[in-house]
Image (cartoon, rainbow, N blue to C red):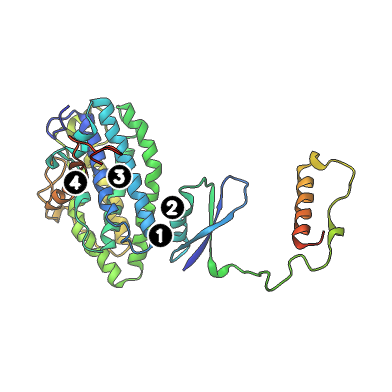
Amino acid sequence: MIWEVFRQEEAGDRHTHCGNVHAPDREMALLFAQIQHGRRMQTNSLWVAPSDEIGEVDADETEFGGTTDKSYRWAITYNQIDASFAEEVAESEAEQEEAAEKRGDV
Amino acid sequence: MAQPVPGDLSPVEAQLLRLADDEYVLAERYTEWQIYAPTPEADLALANIAQDEFGHARLWFDLLQDEFGYEEADLLWERDPGNFLHSPLVELETPDGDWADTVVRSYLYDVAERLRLDALADSSFDPLADRVRKVQSEEGYHREHAQSWLDRLTGGGGDAHQRVQSAVDRLFPHALTLFAPTANEDEIVAAGVRTRSLADVRADWLDEVVQYLESLDVVVPDPSAVTRPDEVGRDGSHTGDWAALHEEFTATYRELGFDDPATLRSENA
């Protein structure tokens, strides 16, 4: 049985997929994952989940973000101000601009 | 500096050597599973445990060097095999491909290790007590590893359960030597190097080991009825398996030829 392993570097970080382990059950998966995925990298926490239990939808099956121009959805409310005073606003704008460029909207 | 000789050690030296030799020799046996363990995951886990045990051996060997003036070669590479003090439990050759043997040995050893580290945590010899805590934090994984395997090997009945039972029958008499005294055991306790006697530690070990193994439907031999092996390790006496292992782990040291060492880009390289 294959267990997908997700590693968190520091408390508060997201758990990020980092690989998998073969194990007969959850307890053994956690035991093995500690060595295989938590030993060399800084690790605060590991999750394991059975591979079979993970659902997937990919770009062959759907159009992520739709196919039409969605730039009207950008959260740019105050165009004339420097958004750097609020990190999350600046990040959100940058992310959305980048995504739009990748889709070819802009 | 001469190499350590079993009958001629201070209490602290004797205690440190018992610890160091047990860890070092067990790690050598674990290492033999490299690339042969049942799965890649099992391989990595056991390799990691072996590295931990080598690391612990290093802590104790370092103390012997720092505090008593031994050289590394006195303690390992040039020490006479009859001057090692480890329990024969850790030196026994693993029956070919018998994972249950390794798991049982690890369990019997790791429970004893936890109890003895607890008995050393308040050692009168501060450098020893200081290092105990470092080791304790890694030993938890070793016990969890051994018990997780034992639970599963015995859970399904059949061949695996039988192999565990055979390993217990074979290893248990040797495991009792973990608690055999060195020549100066009385001084070790009197000087507070270890705060509990081996007999006390052994009683706790028996309680725990018997209760757990019986919960898995594994029969534990009656210690008083067990035929005791002649070799007890702590006095330098060892089984036939030890000579070959000693020969093997010192081979590279001898082959390197330290009288005429090779250096990179030189004639002898």
Tell whether B165 sits left or right of B154. left
Query: In front: mark 2 or mark 4?
Result: 4
Q: Residues within 10 Å of mark 1 (few under 14, many from 20)?
A: many
The secondary structure type at the circle numbered 4 is helix
Query: In front: mark 2 or mark 3?
Result: 2
Q: Farthest residue toward the left?
A: B230
- C-alpha span from label 2 to label 4: 30 Å
**What residue type is disc 4 on?**
Ala
- C-alpha span from label 1 to label 2: 8 Å
For the residues beneath circles 3 and 1, the answer to whether they share a chain is yes
Query: In front: mark 4 or mark 1?
Result: 4
For the residues beneath circles 2 and 3, the answer to whether they share a chain is no
In the image, B106 versus A64, the foreground residue is A64
The secondary structure type at the circle numbered 2 is helix
Residue A10 location (% of width, % of height): 58, 45
In this view of the protein, can residue B195 be seen by the observer?
no
Identify whether B104 is placed above or below A40.
below
Query: In front: mark 3 or mark 1?
Result: 1
Residue identifier under label 4: B251
Residue identifier under label 1: B41
Query: In front: mark 4 or mark 3?
Result: 4
* Quarter of the rendering occupied by the C terminus of chain A: bottom right
